[in-house]
Structures are given as C-alpha cells and as structure tokens.
Image (tube, helix red, strand yellow):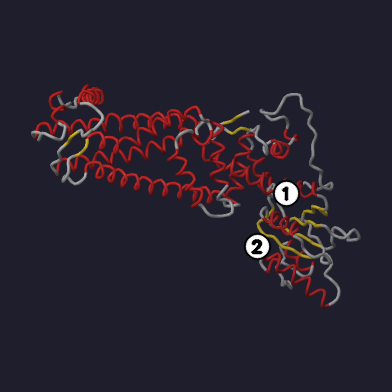
Amino acid sequence: MRAGGSFRQAWLTETLRLREAHWGPLEDGAEVRRVRAQGGGFSQRIIYRAQLLGRREKLNETLRHWTQIARWSLTAMIALALVTGFGMALGALGDGSRPVNLPLALTAMLGLHALTFVLWLAGLGIKANGGGAWLGRIWLDATRKLARGPDAALAPRALGGLLGRSGALRWSLSAVSHLLWLAALLSLLATMLALLSARRYSFNWETTLLSPDAFVALTHALGWLPARLGFAMPSEAVIRLSDGLTPLPQEALALWSGWLIGCVLIYGIVPRLAAFAASSILAWRGIRRAAVLDTSLPGYASLRPRLMPPSEGIAPDAPEGRATHAHIAPLPAGTGFRDGPLIVGLELAPDSVWPPSGLGRAVQNAGVIDSRAQRHALLDQLHARPVPRLLIVCDGYQTPDRGTLAYIAELATYAGETGVSFMAPPSGAHTRESRLQTWREQLEAVGLQAGQVHSALGPALAWLDGVHHEAHDL
C-alpha cells in the first residue's frame, strides 16, 4: 500500500528505517505522541515520525551534507571532463606543425565515446550497477568515500534503495554519465573551433593497407548524415588528393575542417544529448515513483500498532474486520486533568504515603506512576492538555537511571514550569550528600536547572501551589 510524499521525505524515512534496522529502534515516545496527535494515514504518520526523529538525531544534516558533497564531486568531475575534452582536441590536432591524419584524429576524438556509448546501450538490459553508466557509478562511489560521519554511509544506501526499487537508479546514473560526456565533447568541439580558427592545419588520410577507394567510401559514409544537416563534405577528387603526397588548396582544408566538426557534432554531441535527455526524463519519472512510501517494507509493519493504536478506531488504510483492543492502561481514578498545577509520584517505595500532606486545593494529583503503560498514558494526557506547573516526586533512596531521567525530561516538555523533589531524602549525611549530588548532576544534564530541584518536599509543594517563599534547593 502506498501514499504520496516528496522524494526528500521518502529519502529521510528510508535512511531512518535502515538506521533502526542496523542499530535497533530509537526511543520515540514523545515523537509517536506528536504523530498520533497530528493524525493522518499510516504512511503519513511514518513520514512525520521520520521528520521528527530526523531533526532530533540530525539525520537531516547528514542528508544535507551528503547532498553538498555529491554536488561538489559532480562539479569537480565536470571540470575534469572539460579539461579532458580540451586535451583530446589538442592531442588529435596537434600544434599545426605536422599534417593531421584524419582517421587517427577522428578515432582519438570519438573512439572512446563511441565505445562507451555502445556499452551503455548494451547495458540497458542489466539492472545491477546502473547498467553501462560507469561514469555515474564512479561519481556515486567517489561521493560515498568523501562523506564522513556515523550515518554517512546510510544516506547513499538509502538513496540507492529508493531509486533501485523505483527503477530510477540506472537512469539517474546514466544521466550523470551522459552529462560528463557532454561536457567533454562540448569542450572538445569548442577547442577544435578555436584551434582551427587560429592555426593552419593540413589533413591527409595516410594508410598502408587501405586503398583510396576504401577511404573514399568511408569518408562518404561518415559525411552523409552531417551533409544532410548542412555540413559541407569533400568531393571524391579532394578525398583522393588528400593522400599526403599532394599539397591541398585552402578550400580543401576548409572542407576537411567542416567534415571533422560535423562528425564530432553529429556522432558525438547529438547522441549524448539525446541520451541525456531521455535518461533525465526516465529518472525524473522514477524519482516521482520513489517518493511514494512503500509501507510493506520491513521495519514499517512494527510501527502500525504504535502509530495507529486500535483505540483510535480502524484507520482508513487498515484491513477491515480486524478486532480492536485498547492497549493503554488507565491512570488511577480521578485523574481527569484541569488547567492547574499537577503533582506525580515516580516509582516511589511501596510504603510511601500518597498523596503527600499539604497539597493545595488547586493541585491535581496524577498518582504514583510505576508501569510502562501508566507512563505512556500520563504522557498522552499531558500532550493533549499541558499543565502550567508540574512537580515530579522521586524516591530519594534510589539512584537515577537513564530511563527515569529521560522520562522526567519528557514530562517537562508538557509543563510551563517543572520541579523535582523527593518523597524521603536519604538518611545519613554522607549518603545524603552523594545521592543528592548524583541527582543534581544527572538532572542538570537533561536540562533542569539547580533551582528546579528541591531537596525537601515542603518547599516544593509550596512552589507547586504558587506560594512564593524561600526553598532550600540543591
């Protein structure tokens, strides 16, 4: 089942899918809640989740960095192609001090181009490695090697997977290959025009094995199509005189110059331009297909229960007739939140007295959160109705772990102000100081300031109720 979206979004989503397939699922509780609040079909929710996690994990920057490297490497290869075209023309024509051997000059200018073009046509039936677009493959491999970073290898792999499944990979690499050849051939043509305009060249068809008749036939065959397009072609008499034994008049030299230019243009530039245009159109169509998310890929099916919870009802793209069962465990009774301060206990000791005495009348009580289901349920309610002030009461005898700290930080995103206190501070001076120091360092690491962490519950309750008096903070 498929749904639309931009190619950039599909690329980011595929990169995230590959990352989670290699290194395990990311912690995405907050992002999933935002996705579910946003609504939409399953594919839209997958893409939105990828956007949120991409910003958080800086995958957007990875794709942007890889794109910049790809552009710079392509620019460098185009510059190299321009230099190559210049060198091909100079090597074929020389400096004018010696006659130009016409068969050798034409082979030097168009031989490699013709060979690679035939190989590309033959490789159209080969799906792997982009067919015969070897210059495009070199560009892609060079870009992969230049990219650095922990996720840099995922970007080209995700790109190749997307383009490969839609059939756009071979055409994209072909377009790059033809573009580079166009740059080289255009540079070759421009250099030829400059050299032929600035220097006087003499031409001949020196050969030992071929007869004059064979060279006449070859010249007429190659010059037939350029002649149909307006290029002048040497006559049979001029061809026979160009054996290197007879000086040629200026008119004959001009005819040979036009013949060479026509061959380069018609047999070099025109085929490459046509192939580039066709490859670009087919690549564009494939990229449009690649922008459509394929939700049948591994890694997406496991997201359906979380992004499309049964409690929301059957989604438009869910199979009909599937039974629905709510998976969200309810919070303790009386937890209907209003617009007021909220207190919540987090994994407190079983013998803790809850709620603590001294709560203000306006304070809402979320109870003690112990299970994973209760954590998600509280976050869902806070996401729907954030509170202006939140106090999280922890067990002072426990050392904070990463999961607890991450949950505290996530709760804090749904409150205007957040405070942390302890139901019972550790007994013993040395133990108390070390534990409180650990809590302070860890909470500051997740973004809570020292003034938001209360060592005693009394001042924290007064702060929660809006009473301004001095509290002893860590």
420 relative to 278 in the view: left or right: right
Q: Residue furthest right?
A: 351
- Front one among 83 and 404: 83
Identify the mark at residue 379; answer none if there is no mark: 1
Relative to 172, say whether 373 is above or below: below
Q: Which percent across, then down, holds residue 72?
A: 41, 49
Residue at point 61%, 32% (across, down) = 294
| Residue type highlighted by circle 1 | Leu
Q: Which percent across, then down, holds residue 407?
A: 73, 55
- Front one among 297 and 438: 297
Q: Residue furthest front?
A: 208
Q: Residue furthest bottom?
A: 429
Q: Quadrant of residue 41?
A: top right
Q: Which percent across, then down, holds residue 427?
A: 86, 73
Q: Which quadrant holds the C terminus?
A: bottom right
The residue that label 2 is drawn on is: 447
Secondary structure beneath dot 2 equals loop
| Residue type highlighted by circle 2 | Gly
Q: CA distance from mark 1 to mark 2?
A: 18 Å
Task: Single out the mark in the foreground, 1 or 2.
Answer: 2
Residue at point 43%, 40% (across, down) = 135
